[in-house]
Image (cartoon, rainbow, N blue to C red):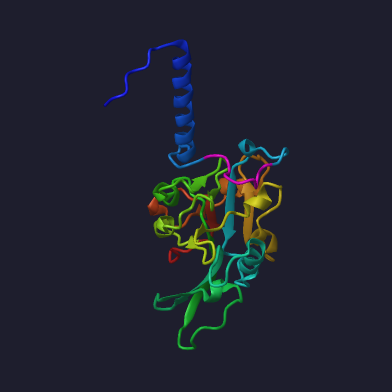
Amino acid sequence: MTKPLEPLTRRNFVKKGCELAASAVLFLGILPMKTARGSSMTTPHNNDSDSPQYDWEEHLYAFLVDTRKCIGCGICVKACRIENNVPEGFYRTWVERYEISERGEVYVDSPKGGQEGFTPIEPGFKTTKGFFVPKLCNHCDNTPCTQVCPVGASYSTKEGVVLVDSKRCIGCGYCVQACPYASRYLHPVTKTADKCTWCYHRITKGLPPACVQACPVGARQFGDLKKEDDPVRKVLATERISVLQMEKLTKPNCYYIGLDKEVR
């Protein structure tokens, strides 16, 4: 038996309007906001940037790696592990070694993420060119990881930083598989997605990421593209730069100088 309709009175009208408003708020709270770029973007889901001095509207961050300077010492990886309590066997950033033989053979390794440096490779491999390539999350504008997340746990902030809300993450691993740079993993304890955040808890306080601060040769640099005198902004405007896997069209915000064609 159906319930008879209530007469439309001013009181009922206001009541229904409040119910609809509450439903709308709940619905919008579940879905991530969308930017004009097409990626999920919102203010941080945590309190890392909740500071009266910090305004995320005033920043647009970028990361720069100069492979010509990297010496493969691994100090950056250690600094990241300590700063972010990264579990053993997993890495938010790592360093790869590339050795190119006279016949064009490419040897690539990254023992323990490069955090303890590198030992000489097999004597029979005649190297004609060798270099190191630091890698990390590229904090892309067109992010595959945020697009596949079914619950909006992976998202982009207004400053261009890709983050994971561990309270929303259900540990499905879709984002881990979607990332073309292999920069994500499922944390063995929390069972949620984890990755490089550019040390968001530091940069929102005016500090550089731990890996940048620790690098003894300045191979890693962090910049704010909204500041006219920013060194990274000047390099991007004057130097020949590259990004990893440009064909993936992810629009990375991690840039490289001196990147060889052998690097993927």
Left or right of 145? Residue 211 is: right
Residue closest to the far right: 53
Residue at point 44%, 16% (across, down): 12
Left or right of 171? Residue 199 is: right
* Residue 77 location, quadrant: bottom right
Write down the region rendered in magenta. 42-50
Residue closest to the far left: 1
Residue 197 belongs to the span the image colors magenta: no
Q: Quadrant of the C terminus?
A: bottom left
- The percent position of residue 79, horizontal first and vertical second, equals 66, 65
Residue closest to the far top: 9
Left or right of 48? Residue 185 is: left
Q: Is residue 128 above or below residue 145?
A: below
Q: Depth check: 196 or 233 in front?
A: 196
Is residue 207 visible from the viewing direction of this image? yes
Q: Depth check: 255 or 87 in front?
A: 87
